[in-house]
Image (cartoon, rainbow, N blue to C red):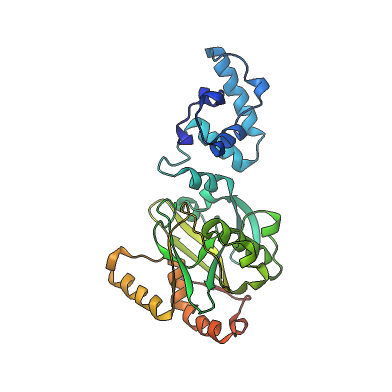
Amino acid sequence: MSLARISIPRLFFLKSVPTSSSTTRLYSSCTPPRSQLLSPPTTTTTARSLALRTAFLSSLSSPRRRLCASTAMGDGAVDAGMDEVQRRLMFEDECILVDENDRVVGHDTKYNCHLMEKIESGKMLHRAFSVFLFNSKYELLLQQRSATKVTFPLVWTNTCCSHPLYRESELIDQNALGVRNAAQRKLLDELGIPAEDVPVDQFTPLGRILYKAPSDGKWGEHELDYLLFIVRDVNVHPNPDEVADIKYVNREELKELLRKVDAGEGGLKLSPWFRLIVDNFLFKWWEHVEKGTIQEAADMKTIHKLT
């Protein structure tokens, strides 16, 4: 059931709303205390309930307030075409805002960080990471993003691409530990790779890039992206809410994929950040992976501005 279509009165009587357990938890987190909701829904009571709800929302943290308000009011803040999982992530997750020197300057929802009108304001540059996971045969794991992703649905990209969140464990700057913690979390979320298969100390941060890329007329990316390499044989169980397909490729197979993309064959597309990384760094770094000299390629002092 789409949360955006639930009317205000129904939110006050949760027992009458048939939902999954996860949806019920979300409604409950958006609902004022039961003691405030005992009167029958007369016109006067409904007005009183709306006033109580407004006061209740103001007491919540800003991301949850925005989610609950858009859920109850149906104010258009949440796109009708956005599925429930992506809607939750867009409003509950807060990205780390940085300046062009990677200094933390604030935080905001994933929703705001990916709106092109806000990106163009110059205030939504946020930290991200791109994981490149190789198996023991030095094949690179690629994923195709799910059709329900808000930005760049169904494009092929590197193993895992996401954001460290504005939380203590993912704000640690020393040796990019916060970003590595986030990468371990998202490899589990997106690909079902257990944490023990990808220990945080096995990620090698190789560099940082800064880029901007529109997805469509409304959405896009403006990221300061940490590039993380890891060589591990892992168990993979993709989450269909995040991933449509996966495959391992060697260097020649990736070059063939690039050829097909450039020729427009089969409607294949690559994410813009992956293409920038491929064109500028990937193949020379891949040689270091095979030689076991990947640390020699690392340069975390430079922020490469790519277009």
Q: Residue at x 44, y 55 (%)?
A: 151
Q: Position of residue 212 (x, y in %)?
A: 47, 63
Q: Quadrant of residue 98?
A: bottom right
Q: Position of residue 143 (x, y in %)?
A: 45, 64
Please determine whether, in this image, residue 203 is positioned above or below residue 60. Answer: below
Q: Quadrant of residue 2?
A: top left
From where the camera sits, is residue 102 visible? no
279 horizontally vs 24: left or right: left
Q: Quadrant of residue 189?
A: bottom right
Q: Position of residue 56 (x, y in %)?
A: 64, 29
Q: Among all residues in the image, which is located at the extreme front?
A: 235
Identify which residue, 255 or 126, lies in the foreground: 255
Q: Residue at x 43, y 55 (%)?
A: 146
Please determine whether, in this image, residue 90 is positioned above or below residue 34. Answer: below
Q: Residue at x 60, y 85 (%)?
A: 293
Identify which residue, 15 or 265, lies in the foreground: 15
